[in-house]
């Protein structure tokens, strides 16, 4: 997965000591990586939302953030 700056996605958080600081959906211990792993395994966003009890809107927001971030020109600082 591309190295995205998840700090700009309002639906996720990284808290030191919570799931080893991984990016998770706010207020949960469900990692963002879990969504991408399960999409790759063939699950639909709706199935992921149901199985892992994540609001479908939050999954859509994370997917939108990822795809819109990939559309941007890379910055080489």
Image: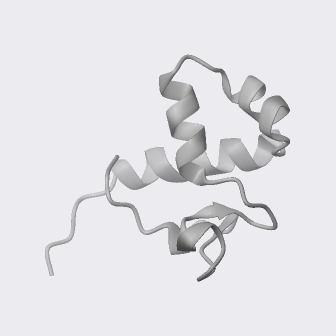
Report whether 71 appears left or right of 47: left
Q: Residue furthest top?
A: 42
| 9 vs 30, nearest the viewer | 30
Whether 33 is drawn above or below 12: the answer is above
Q: Quadrant of residue 42?
A: top right
Report whether 18 appears left or right of 50: left
Identify the residue at horizontal 24%, vertical 58% (top origin): 73
| 75 vs 30, nearest the viewer | 30
Residue 45 on image: x %, y %: 68, 29
Residue 70 on image: x %, y %: 35, 49
User: Split into 4 quadrants, where in the image is the C terminus?
Assistant: bottom left
Residue 68 on image: x %, y %: 46, 50
Scheme by which the image is coloured: one colour
Residue 24 on image: x %, y %: 64, 61
Report whether 62 appears left or right of 59: left
Q: How many marks?
A: 0
Whether 6 is drawn above or below 71: the answer is below
Whether 38 is drawn above or below 7: the answer is above
Identify the residue at horizontal 39%, vertical 61% (top origin): 4
| 52 vs 57, nearest the viewer | 52
Identify the residue at horizontal 52%, vertical 38% (top origin): 36
The answer to whether any part of residue 30 appears in the image is: yes
Q: Quadrant of residue 18?
A: bottom right
Identify the residue at horizontal 62%, vertical 80% (top origin): 17
The answer to whether any part of residue 8 appears in the image is: no
């Amino acid at each position: 997965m591309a190295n995205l700056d998840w700090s700009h996605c309002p639906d996720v958080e990284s808290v030191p000591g919570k799931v080893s600081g991984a990016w998770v959906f706010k207020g949960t211990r469900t990692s963002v990586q879990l969504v991408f792993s399960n999409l790759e395994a063939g699950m639909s966003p709706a199935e992921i939302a149901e199985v892992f009890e994540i609001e479908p809107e939050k999954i859509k927001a994370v997917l939108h953030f990822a795809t819109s971030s990939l559309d941007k020109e890379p910055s080489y600082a």
